[in-house]
Image (cartoon, rainbow, N blue to C red):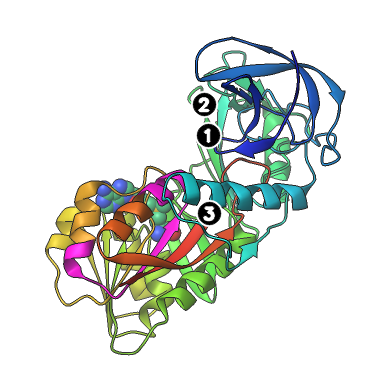
Amino acid sequence: MIVEIEKIVHGGYGLTHSGNSVILVPLSVPGDIVDIEFAEGEGISFGWIKSIIKPSIYRKDPCCPVFGLCGGCDFDNMEYPYELTIKEEILREDLSRIAKMKVTDIDRVIGSSEYGYRNHARFKVSVEGEVGFFMKKSHEVVPLPDEGCRLLHRDINEFLKKIRRTGEFRAGGFRIRTDTMGNIFQKGVHGLKDNTFCYQYVNKLKYRLKIDDFFQVNNSVTAQWLNIIESYLNLESNDIVVDLFSGSGLIILTIAKKVKSVTGIEINRNAVNNARYNAGWNNVSNVSFIRANAAKGLNLLAGVNKIVVDPPRSGLTENIIGAVVTLAPSVIVYASCDTATFSRDLKRFSEMGYHLKEVSLIDMFPRTKHSEVVARIERN
Ligand SMILES: C[S@@+](CC[C@H](N)C(=O)[O-])C[C@H]1O[C@@H](n2cnc3c(N)ncnc32)[C@H](O)[C@@H]1O
């Protein structure tokens, strides 16, 4: 069937219609006229491009030879400014469809270097010993081209080139990280001693973390992301703040010196140990940490007036939202890497006496379907 792609929706799929049914077409660009094959059915079905009859004006040739096969990228086939427009539209549409909010003004839309931004990758190794990433929705390894992955920082690709020549990797895969000083850290490459820790430097603060631990992946926008979180919190010296999902201390240490005190709540033992170490290393003393499940940690607290939450992609549970609202903070700053779960949680907050004041989009993950949102939510 020949169709025109209308728009891109959550999940990175192009959307088109046939009669009453919706067809989602991966790897398409709005405005493309494409010949698709699709499994006819009720409701939503998926279509695959057989050929492009007329390409969209926003389409470009992908930079990567394994684009479309490798599970890493979704948008390497379109111009980057257009990708940003699409991400803004997806945010607006999720807010309207899921949160039932018409948001016309997105406060700030921050783009990033489109390539070379990732400071960290977990590589997979095929049974034949080839290095790559998993194919979309599969555990089959797609080998990387010789030049490496365009999303990765050049220092990682350089290092990868050297170690690929030796051809010896652990079957389960390996990690490489780089920091802002250009140092390389790795775990799992045969013949090299594993690095236990790695270091990151953001806004004059330094962070030590275990090489396996979570850290924001895009050095070029992390500082701007933190600045937005800080400005949405509108910090004052008598504030008593909670950093929920505090990880290795990135947000808590950024805001601590401007407030009376901050409590970090985090479930991962390594992350809490890192955050405690990082507080001491940066001479920050007005912070404390609770290692607990988010809702349980919140239930131990009182007298909090601002809360920042930065949950995993799955967002907040009903228990966590309930525990946040019970503390009745005047401001909740919500950082999210998923516009759909963010919109779902925002709806719950709006049903419980809060409203959205401002929202910004930061493109932490160019060329992929993912983006980062930061919102200021105020008590009514
Ligand atoms: C997106 S990361 C944010 C970390 C930190 N804000 C940062 O920017 O580096 C989410 C964090 O939530 C933690 N986490 C996941 N589920 C949790 C839960 N139920 N309770 C507390 N922490 C949790 C993870 O261990 C992870 O460190």
Residue 46 appears at what percent x and percent y?
A: 59, 18
Q: Of the residues tagged 3 and 1, which is closer to the observer?
A: 3
Q: Residue placed at 37% from the left, 55% from the top?
A: 346
State which quadrant residue 356 falls in.
bottom left
Q: Is residue 86 visible?
A: yes
Query: On the rendered structure, is 76 left or right of 342?
Result: right
Is the residue 160 above or below the residue 325 in the image?
above
What residue would you read off at disc 1?
A: 174
Say few, some or many: other residues with alpha carbon within 10 Å of mark 3 (under 14 / 14 to 19 / 20 or more): many
Q: Which residue is mark 2?
A: 170
**Residue 332's quadrant in the figure?**
bottom left
- Residue 135, x across and y down, in percent: 60, 22
Q: Are marks 1 and 2 in contact (CB under 8 Å)?
A: yes
Secondary structure at badge 2 equals loop
Which class describes the residues within 10 Å of circle 2: few (<14), some (14-19), or many (20+)? few
Classify the position of the C terminus by image quarter: bottom left
Farthest residue to the front: give it: 19
Using residue 90 as the reference point, say whether residue 292 is left or right of it.
Answer: left
The three-letter amino acid code for the residue at tag 3 is Glu
> For the point 49% across and 74% down, which residue is it?
205
Disc 3: which residue: 372
Which sits earlier in the primary sequence, circle 2 or circle 3? 2
In three-dimensional space, the C-alpha distance between marks 1 and 2, rounded to whole angstroms, equals: 7 Å
Mark carried by residue 94: none
Viewer-side label of 1, 2: 1
Q: Which contiguous range is marked in magenta?
A: 325-344
Q: Is residue 269 visible?
A: no
